[in-house]
Amino acid sequence: MQISPSILSADFADLRSELDAISNADWAHVDVMDNHFVPNLTLGLPVVEALLKVSPIPLDCHLMIEDPDRWAPAYAEAGAQSVTFHAEAARDPRTLARTLRAAGARAGLAIKPGTPWAPWAELLPELDMVLVMTVEPGFGGQSFMADQMPKVAEVRAAVDKHGGQVWIQVDGGVSASTIEQCAEAGADVFVAGSAVYGAESAAAAVDELRALATK
Ligand code: DX5
Ligand code: ZN
């Protein structure tokens, strides 16, 4: 069970300290938004390159961008340890996942709440992670969509059948009150933004979430 706090809810003027504050987490989740795939603009490759130099933990880059086939490989080449792109945006997800892996990154495929899992199941051998969104991508602090839990369970069944080491990540509205149902459905990597950075102690929130997920 791994915790990946989203720095979308961190203080963008002080990201180095905000990464240090979650050094007990497994990953730092970095939400890249291009104002086209989602109606919000965050940060891009130059900032990720800077964060890679100072982060005490590996970066889990979640690319909410159009044309990931063109833009995602650069994140892997820069040294991002995990790069997740959206199924809805990719033209050739199989080739893209292979390119990311060849560049040394873990390859992740993300699906939005309205996107079914079944059409993507055949990609499992190319993937290291499947991200099931539990909010519409674009903003932190939204309400958790419990209706995505059957999809998490469906991905879990496919991963177990495949027999691989593919991780299942949930992202959006994950908190102390929702993480247990995610774990029960089969998720094993948990993104939390507001629940971590909105807490008095981000590190304590990470520990609490991990304990609840492991229960
Ligand atoms: C939403 C992002 C999430 C977001 C989660 O598009 O992908 O990573 O930061 O924030 P919370 O945990 O506050 O829902
Ligand atoms: Zn995210």
Image (cartoon, helix red, strand yellow):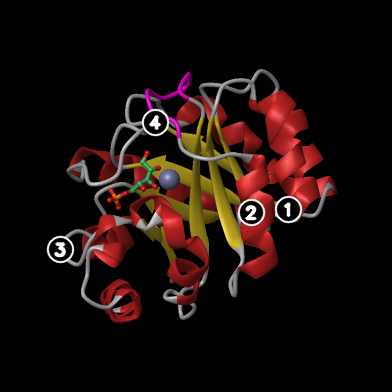
Residue 40 on the magenta segment: yes
Q: CA distance from mark 3 to mark 4?
A: 22 Å
Tag 4: Cα neighbours inside 10 Å, few (<14), some, or many (≥20)? some
Q: Which of the 4 image quadrants contains residue 82? A: bottom right
Which of the numbered marks, if any, corresponds to residue 215?
Answer: none
Please state the quadrant of the image where ligand 2 appears: top left
Quadrant including the N terminus: bottom left
Identify the mark nearer the N-term, 4 or 2.
2
Which label is found at residue 105?
Answer: 1
Q: Main secondary structure of the magenta part?
A: loop
Label 1: few (<14), some (14–19) or many (≥20) C-alpha neighbours in 10 Å: many
Give the structural element (helix, strand or loop) at label 1. loop
Cβ–Cβ below 8 Å for labels 2 and 1?
Answer: yes
If you read the primary sequence from the N terminus, does the residue marked by circle 2 or circle 1 appear first? Answer: 2
**Within 10 Å of the Cα at label 2, are there few (<14), some (14-19), or many (20+) other Cα atoms?**
many
Callout 1, which amino acid? Ala
Task: Pinpoint residue 58: horizontal percent, then vertical percent.
Answer: 61, 66
Classify residue 189 by image quadrant.
bottom left
Magenta-drawn stretch contains 1: no
Question: Mark 4 belongs to which amino acid?
Answer: Lys
Alpha carbon separation for disc pair 1 and 4: 22 Å
Instruction: Kindly identify which residue carries mark 2.
Output: 82
The magenta-colored residue range is 35-41
Q: Looking at numbered disc 3 in the image, what kind of residue is underneath it?
A: Ser
Front-most of residues 161 and 40: 40
Query: Of marks 2 and 3, which one's residue comes earlier in the chain?
Result: 2
The residue that mark 4 highlights is 112
User: In the figure, 55 relative to 135: above or below?
Assistant: below
Residue at 40% over, 27% down = 116
Gap in angstroms between the C-alphas marked 2 and 3: 27 Å
- Which residue is at 15% across, 63% downward? 177
